[in-house]
Amino acid sequence: MKRLILITAVILTLCSCSIKLADDYYGSKSDGELSAVISINCSTADDRGKHDGAEILGDYSVKIDESATVFDALKNACRDNRIQLDFKGSGDSVYVSGIDYLYEFDCGSLSGWEYSVDGVFPSVGCNAFKLKGGEKISWLYTCDLGEDIGNKYRED
Amino acid sequence: MKAFRDLHPACATVYFLAVLIIAGFSFNPFFLVPLFFGTLLFYGSVKGCKRAFSSGLKLLLLIVVIAAVNPLFSHNGATVLFFLNDSRITLEALIYGGVLGLAAADAVLIFMCVNTVFDSERIIYLFGRYMPNIGLVISMALGFVPKLRAMYASVSSAQRGLQKSRVKRALRCFSAVITQSMEGAIITSDSMRSRGYGTGKRTFFNRFRVFPRDLIFGSLFIVLFTLSILPLILGDTAFVIYPVTRFSAKGIMSGFGLSASAVLAFFPFLYELTEGLKWKYSISKI
């Protein structure tokens, strides 16, 4: 009985995973009714010599599904442009730790990736922010907890 | 054969500290792989091939498990093997896990070798003069685990007929063992007090003499260690894993360092081997 439950659990876990080869994954372009403009920039890290080039992705119009989140838009854009993306967690608490081999803490303990939508830095996780289409998203790398990219950290 | 064991304890301490530092801080397979085989061979020459083989297999399994698990958590790296639910499983993460596992296996192996070389007499000798209390506590603590095991085995065999349920039996044995060892600790302390432990200045007897070979080997260890750690500090033997794995050895120092660490890794085994052959040869002459 115990073994049966274990085997079922393993099979269910394996079925819920989708395994794709790199060419298959990058080969399929993202698709959807809505679109948003996304850019990825790390000029702060480039200034310190931690990354080659400031602009990882210039303004790119990415196709997204209805009720997609900022994270979905980033995922699609990275897939279309073959950019490496590393994240932790799932659901509302997805955390983007690295883009294009540039990781959090690479420029000190206050560094990492933040995002803004239409110039505003939302204080929710990127997979909790729903898009309506037509927004301008920018992912920015900060070396000083947001202060150097115009998102000063407030205590409240 | 226990030739390496006959060296002066301070000499062996220098050796084990040196290899432990290399295993802990190099994070470079060119240093770690020779160390793995060197310490394993030394362990085999002391404890027998069978035990060395089985622990080597177990440690290999450990390395494989860590190497397989690391890519699930780390998605850094340029060479994508496949995508698992939008997360990349990369070759570099696999390599990183392998090196991490190798460093852990090396540390375990080194401590296994330390245990074959250092008995309680040597530990008390090393710590006794400067930190007598710490030396005694370390020596007693190291003795406790095998003692508890033996005690548990004897209690468990006595309880086997009395208690059917395995869980209940284990609980009873556990409580009996704890009681017995606590009683033992009280008796030990009483006995030590009645013999006047800690009342006066203590003298220290030991059988360890410093022979010329101890001085030679000790300084050899220090020279080899310095040679192998220098390129690591200077960054001449950089093993970069993320985002693309590459090993760059530049300068003549890195060559010296790699060969010095290999010599250091295989030294106890080779010493054991040559002394064994000498012994065999001297017998056949008689």
Image (cartoon, rainbow, N blue to C red):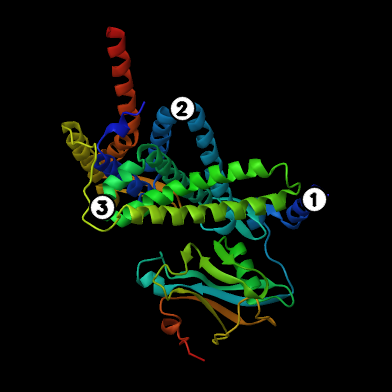
Q: Are marks 2 and 3 in contact (CB under 8 Å)?
A: no
Please tell me how crowded label 2 is: few (under 14), some (14-19), or many (20+) other residues with Cα within 10 Å. Answer: few
- Give how far across and how far down residue A65 sits, in percent: 73, 73
Q: What is the chain identity of the residue bearing mark 2? A: B
Mark 3 or 1, closer to the camera: 1
Label 3, on which residue?
B234
Query: Who is closer to the viewer here, B108 or B153?
Result: B153
Cα distance between the residues tagged 2 and 3: 39 Å
Task: Determine the residue positioned at 44% across, 49% down.
Answer: B245
- Give how far across and how far down residue B161 sits, in percent: 72, 41
Q: Of the residues shown, which amino acid type is indicated by label 1?
A: Lys
Label 1, on which residue?
A2
Task: Determine the residue positioned at 33% across, 49% down.
Answer: B21
Q: What is the chain identity of the residue bearing mark 3? A: B
**Residues tagged by mark 2 and mark 1 found on one chain of the structure:** no
Cα distance between the residues tagged 2 and 1: 40 Å
Q: Is residue A53 left or right of residue B211?
A: right
Compared with A27, B228 (above or below) is above
Cα distance between the residues tagged 3 and 1: 55 Å
Mark 2 or 1, closer to the camera: 2
Q: Of the residues shown, which amino acid type is indicated by label 3?
A: Leu
Q: Which mark is residue B48?
A: 2
Instruction: Identify the secondary structure beneath mark 1.
Output: helix
